[in-house]
C-alpha cells in the first residue's frame, strides 16, 4: 500500500526537495512517513524523525525530546537546540528531516525545525491533516520552496481488496469488498478496523477460502472508539448536525435549511465529514462520510439517548423524495472526460456508490409496491428492469414470476417478461435448455413474435454455449419482423460482434425502427461495435458519455456495460489508472444482475491482470473474485476465464506459454468466438511474442480484412525472428496509431522472452531498442509482464550504478579506496546489482549500465 506515494516522496527528497504529505484522519499518513524513514535508512541516509501528538501540543520541546540532544542544548532553549541540530545536519552525507503530524507538533519544536531547515537546506518531509485553508489559522504551515505536495486519496476498490486480503490472509468476496469500501469511504484505518472487528464479532466468516458477510451489516460495538475519533473536536452544533444528517440519510441541500445552519455544513465539509454530490435531478445532495458514522448514530444505544432530536427531525423534515430521475446528456471532449476520471479518482467513489444504491433502492421499492398493489404484467415489467442491472433478490424475483397475471397482456411486455425469466433460469442454475424452452414456447403462442423468440434463443445458445454453425442462415431469418422492439437488431449486432464483424453490427443497429424493449442494451452494442471496428477513441468517448448518462438516470445495466467498453478502450491506450478507477466505481456497487454479471466478472479479471508479479511469487488479485464456475472461453474479451488463468501462471520457459496460448486460441475459435480470439491473440502476442500466436493472429486479421494492426505485426515478426536491424528501422519509421501502447508492451515482452531463453545478448539489444522507443514515445500506464522463474532487471540505485561503472575496469579494493567505503560494502553492492540486472559477470554488468545510459 502507498508504494507510489512513497516512491514519489523519496525521489523528491533525493533531489533536495521538501515534501508535504496531506491526508485526512486515518488516511495512512503515519504509515507513509514510517515507510519513508525505513527506505531512507536502507540507502544509508541519516534521518531525524519527529512525531506530533495532540496531547503534547502544549508541552515545550516535546517533539524534539527523543532526538538525544545533550542537556546543555536543552538548557539554552530552542535556539540552543537549533544550533546543535544544525551542526549535525551540516555534516557530510545524506540527511533528511521527517516530521509526522507537523500540525500537532509543539510550538518550540516547530520553531527548531523551521530554523534548522532554513539554515541547512536539508529536505523536510512532513505529514499533516487535510484541513482546508479556511480552518488552518491555528496550524503551522511551513513556507518552503521548492516543495512538493503529495495527497493521499481514498483507496480504490482494488486497493481495499488487497488491504483486506493482507489483513485477513485470505481474499474477501465481491460483495464484502464493496460493502467495506462503501462504509469506509476508502479510509485505510477504517478498512482495517472494520474487517478486524467484523471477524471478532463473527460478522465476516471464512467460507471456501473467501471472507463473506454473515448478514447485511458489519457494524459492531468494537468500532465505537474508531468512529468517535473522526468527529473529535467538533462543537455541539456540528455534532448535532452530523447526527441529524445520519438520521436523515442523503438529502438535497434545500431540505436541510430548516434543520441546520449553512455555516455548520461548511464546517463539516471542511473536516471531510460530509460528501456533496449531484443526484439524478441535478440537486446538490449532502451525505455523511465515511458512511460508517451513520451506522454509529443509528445504533439503538445512541438513538435511545437522542429521542428529542429524532422527534424534531420527524416533525420538520418530509419523507424521502422519490421523484423520477431526469435524463441528461453530456458531450465534453474525450481528453476532458479522461481528465474528469482522474479528478474523480481523487475524491473516492464510496459516497457516490452509496448514493446511487440508495436512490436505486427507493425506485425499486416504489415499483415493487406498485406491483404488489396490482400484479399486472405491465407493473412486473417495470419492476424487472431493475434486475437487468441491479443485484437480484431471489425471493422477490420468484414472487414476481409466480404471481404476475399474464393473460390478455401486451405481447411486447410478455416477451420482455419471458426474456427476463429465461435469464433468471440460467442465473439460478436451471440450465440453458430450460431458458431456451421458455423462449420457444412463447414463440409458439405468439406467432407475430416468432422471429424475436428464435433470435433470442439463438443469442442464448451463442452466449452460453457456442456459435451455431448455420449462423448466416439464422441471421438472414432475423430480418423478417417489423416490430419496433429493437430486439432483433440488437441480437444481430451482438452475434456479428461475436464473430468479429463490427461493421455488420453497426449496420444492423442503424437499420432498426426503434429500441423499445432494449433501449439500455443498444448503447452497449454500439459502443462495443465502435471499439471492435478499430475506432477506439470514438468508442471511448461514446461509452464515457453513456456511462455518465446511466449514472444520472440510475441505470445500473448501462453503467456497468458502458464501463466495460470504456475500460477496454482505456487499457488499450495505456490509461490503466483511469481504467482502474472507473472499474472500481463499478465494483463498489456490488455484484450486478443478469447479462452484466459476466461483464462485471470480465472487469474483475481485467483489473486482476495488474497484480504485481515476480519470480516465485503468487499474488492474490481482483481476478480471484470473479466466478470460477464459468467456461474458459466466452463471446467477448474477459468473459471467459482462460486468458486470465493463462496470465496468472508462472512459466519456466517460453515454449510452455506458447503451447497453452495456442491451445486456448483454438478453443475460442472452436466455439466461434472470433472477437475474443483476436483480442486474446493481440494480448498474448504482446505479453510474450511467439511465432505460433503471430501466425494465428495474422490469419484472423487477414480473414476479416483488418489492416489497422499491420505496423504492430511487422514489429512483432522482426522481434521474433531476431532481426534487430529491421526492428530498429521499423520502430524509427513507426507512425503512432492505436497500437502505440501495445508496441511498447511487445518490446517488453520480447525482452522477457529472451531472458527466458537465457539469451542475454539479445535481451540487452532489445532493452536498448525499447529504451530508445520509450524516449521517443513516453507512454502512460504500466506494461504487464508474466511471472517467470527469471527475474526481470530492476533499476539500480545511484550508488549501485556508480560502483557498476567502476567495476568494469577496477578491482573491489580499488573501488573501496576511491569511494571511501569498505571492500565488503563494494562486494554487497555488486552482488545486488548483478541480481537486479540479471547479469552474471562484472563485464556484463558494466555493459548493462552503459547501454542503459545511452
Image: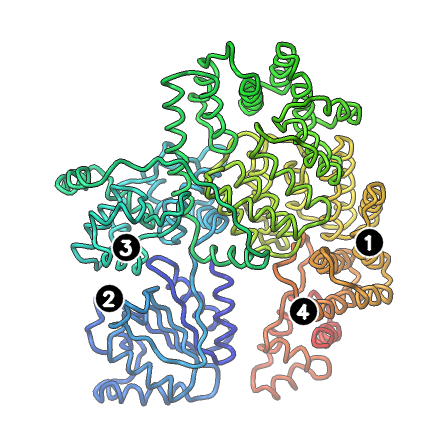
Image depth: mark 4 or mark 3 in front: 3
Residue 750 percent coordinates (x, y):
76, 58
Q: Which residue is mark 4?
A: 834
In the picture shown, does residue 743 fall above or below 72?
A: above
Q: Which mark is residue 230?
A: 3
Position of 297 compared to 283: left or right?
left
Q: Residues within 10 Å of mark 1 (few under 14, many from 20)?
A: few
Image depth: mark 3 or mark 1 in front: 1
So how many labels did they put on this image?
4
**CB under 8 Å between callouts 2 and 4?**
no
Q: Which residue is mark 2?
A: 54
Q: N-terminal of the two: label 4 or label 3?
A: 3
Q: Residues within 10 Å of mark 4 (few under 14, many from 20)?
A: many
Q: N-terminal of the two: label 2 or label 4?
A: 2
Query: Which residue is pictured at 43% across the width and 83% down the height?
Result: 122
**CB under 8 Å between callouts 1 and 2?**
no
Residue 741 percent coordinates (x, y):
69, 58
Q: N-terminal of the two: label 1 or label 2?
A: 2
Q: Which residue is mark 1?
A: 710
The CA span between labels 1 and 2 is 63 Å
Query: Which residue is pictured at 80% across the width and 68% down the height?
Result: 732
In the picture shown, does residue 33 fall above or below 554?
A: below
Amino acid at each position: 500500500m502507498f508504494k507510489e506515494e512513497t516512491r514519489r516522496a523519496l525521489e523528491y527528497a533525493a533531489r533536495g526537495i521538501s515534501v508535504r504529505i496531506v491526508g485526512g484522519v486515518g488516511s495512512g499518513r503515519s504509515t507513509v512517513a514510517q515507510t519513508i524513514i525505513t527506505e531512507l535508512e536502507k540507502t544509508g541516509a541519516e534521518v531525524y524523525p519527529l512525531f506530533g501528538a495532540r496531547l503534547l501540543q502544549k508541552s515545550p520541546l516535546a517533539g524534539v525530546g527523543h532526538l538525544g540532544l545533550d542537556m546543555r542544548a536543552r538548557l539554552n532553549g530552542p535556539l540552543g537546540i537549533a544550533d546543535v541540530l544544525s551542526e549535525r545536519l551540516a555534516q557530510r552525507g545524506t540527511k533528511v528531516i521527517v516530521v509526522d503530524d507537523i500540525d500537532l507538533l509543539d510550538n518550540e519544536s516547530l520553531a527548531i525545525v523551521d530554523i534548522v531547515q532554513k539554515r541547512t537546506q536539508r529536505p523536510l518531509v512532513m505529514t499533516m491533516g487535510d484541513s482546508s485553508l479556511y480552518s488552518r489559522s491555528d496550524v503551522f504551515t511551513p513556507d518552503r520552496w521548492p516543495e512538493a505536495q503529495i495527497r493521499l486519496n481514498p483507496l480504490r476498490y482494488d486497493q481495499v481488496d488487497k488491504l483486506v486480503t493482507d489483513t485477513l490472509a485470505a481474499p474477501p468476496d465481491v460483495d464484502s469488498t464493496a460493502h467495506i469500501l462503501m462504509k469506509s469511504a476508502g479510509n485505510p484505518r477504517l478498512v482495517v478496523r472494520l474487517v478486524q472487528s467484523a471477524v471478532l464479532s463473527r460478522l465476516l466468516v471464512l467460507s471456501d477460502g473467501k471472507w463473506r458477510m454473515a448478514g447485511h451489516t458489519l457494524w459492531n460495538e468494537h468500532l465505537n472508539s474508531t468512529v468517535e475519533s473522526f468527529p473529535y473536536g467538533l462543537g455541539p452544533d456540528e455534532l448535532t448536525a452530523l447526527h441529524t444528517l445520519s438520521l436523515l440519510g442523503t438529502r438535497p441541500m434545500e431540505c436541510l435549511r430548516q434543520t441546520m445552519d449553512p455555516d455548520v455544513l461548511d464546517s463539516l465539509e471542511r473536516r471531510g465529514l460530509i460528501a456533496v454530490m449531484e443526484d439524478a435531478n441535478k440537486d446538490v445532495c449532502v451525505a455523511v462520510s465515511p458512511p460508517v458514522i451513520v451506522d454509529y448514530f443509528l445504533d439503538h444505544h445512541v438513538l435511545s439517548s437522542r429521542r428529542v432530536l429524532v422527534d424534531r427531525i420527524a416533525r420538520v423534515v418530509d419523507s424521502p423524495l422519490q421523484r423520477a430521475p431526469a435524463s441528461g446528456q453530456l458531450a465534453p471532449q474525450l481528453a476532458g472526460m479522461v481528465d474528469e476520471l482522474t479528478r474523480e479518482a481523487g475524491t473516492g467513489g464510496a459516497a457516490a456508490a452509496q448514493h446511487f444504491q440508495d436512490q436505486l433502492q427507493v425506485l425499486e421499492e416504489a415499483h415493487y409496491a406498485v406491483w404488489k398493489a396490482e400484479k399486472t404484467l405491465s407493473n412486473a415489467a417495470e419492476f424487472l428492469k431493475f434486475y437487468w442491472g441491479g443485484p437480484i433478490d431471489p425471493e422477490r424475483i420468484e414472487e414476481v414470476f409466480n404471481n404476475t397475471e399474464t393473460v390478455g397482456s401486451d405481447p411486447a411486455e410478455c416477451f420482455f417478461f419471458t426474456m427476463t425469466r429465461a435469464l433468471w433460469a440460467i442465473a439460478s442454475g436451471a440450465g440453458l435448455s430450460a431458458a431456451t424452452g421458455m423462449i420457444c414456447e412463447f414463440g409458439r403462442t405468439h406467432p407475430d413474435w416468432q422471429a424475436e423468440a428464435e433470435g433470442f434463443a439463438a443469442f442464448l445458445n451463442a452466449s452460453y454455449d457456442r456459435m451455431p454453425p448455420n449462423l448466416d442462415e439464422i441471421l438472414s431469418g432475423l430480418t423478417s419482423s417489423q416490430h419496433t422492439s429493437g430486439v432483433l437488431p440488437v441480437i444481430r449486432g451482438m452475434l456479428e460482434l461475436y464473430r468479429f464483424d463490427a461493421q455488420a453490427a453497426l449496420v444492423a443497429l442503424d437499420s432498426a425502427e426503434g429500441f423499445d424493449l432494449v433501449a439500455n442494451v443498444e448503447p452497449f452494442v454500439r459502443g462495443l461495435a465502435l471499439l471492435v471496428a478499430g475506432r477506439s477513441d470514438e468508442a471511448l468517448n461514446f461509452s464515457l458519455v453513456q456511462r455518465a448518462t446511466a449514472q444520472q438516470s440510475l441505470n445500473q445495466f448501462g453503467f456497468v456495460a458502458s464501463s466495460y467498453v470504456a475500460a477496454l478502450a482505456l487499457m488499450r491506450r495505456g490509461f490503466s489508472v483511469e481504467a482502474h478507477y472507473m472499474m472500481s466505481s463499478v465494483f463498489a456497487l456490488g455484484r450486478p444482475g443478469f447479462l452484466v454479471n459476466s461483464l462485471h466478472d470480465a472487469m474483475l479479471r481485467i483489473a486482476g491482470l495488474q497484480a504485481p508479479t515476480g519470480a516465485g511469487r503468487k499474488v492474490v488479485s481482483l481476478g480471484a473474485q470473479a466466478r470460477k464456475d464459468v467456461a474458459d472461453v466466452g463471446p467477448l474479451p474477459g468473459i471467459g476465464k482462460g486468458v486470465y488463468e493463462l496470465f496468472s501462471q508462472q512459466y519456466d520457459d517460453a515454449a510452455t506459454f506458447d503451447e497453452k496460448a495456442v491451445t486456448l486460441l483454438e478453443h475460442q475459435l472452436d466455439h466461434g468466438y472470433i472477437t475474443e480470439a483476436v483480442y486474446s491473440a493481440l494480448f498474448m502476442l504482446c505479453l510474450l511474442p511467439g511465432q505460433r500466436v503471430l501466425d494465428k493472429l495474422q490469419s484472423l486479421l487477414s480473414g476479416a480484412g483488418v489492416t489497422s494492426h499491420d505496423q504492430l505485426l511487422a514489429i512483432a515478426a522482426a522481434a521474433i525472428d531476431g532481426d534487430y536491424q529491421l526492428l530498429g528501422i521499423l520502430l524509427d519509421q513507426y507512425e503512432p496509431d492505436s497500437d502505440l501502447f501495445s508496441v511498447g508492451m511487445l518490446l517488453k515482452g520480447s525482452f522477457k522472452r529472451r531472458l527466458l531463453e537465457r539469451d542475454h545478448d539479445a535481451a540487452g539489444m532489445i532493452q536498448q531498442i525499447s529504451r530508445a522507443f520509450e524516449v521517443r514515445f513516453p507512454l502512460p500506464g504500466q506494461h504487464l509482464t508474466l511471472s517467470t522463474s527469471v527475474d526481470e532487471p530492476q533499476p539500480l540505485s545511484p550508488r549501485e550504478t556508480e560502483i557498476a561503472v567502476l567495476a568494469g575496469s577496477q578491482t573491489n579494493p580499488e573501488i573501496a579506496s576511491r569511494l571511501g567505503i569498505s571492500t565488503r560494502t563494494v562486494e554487497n553492492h555488486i552482488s545486488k546489482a548483478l541480481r537486479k540486472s540479471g547479469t552474471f559477470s562484472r563485464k556484463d554488468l558494466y555493459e548493462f549500465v552503459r547501454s542503459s545510459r545511452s
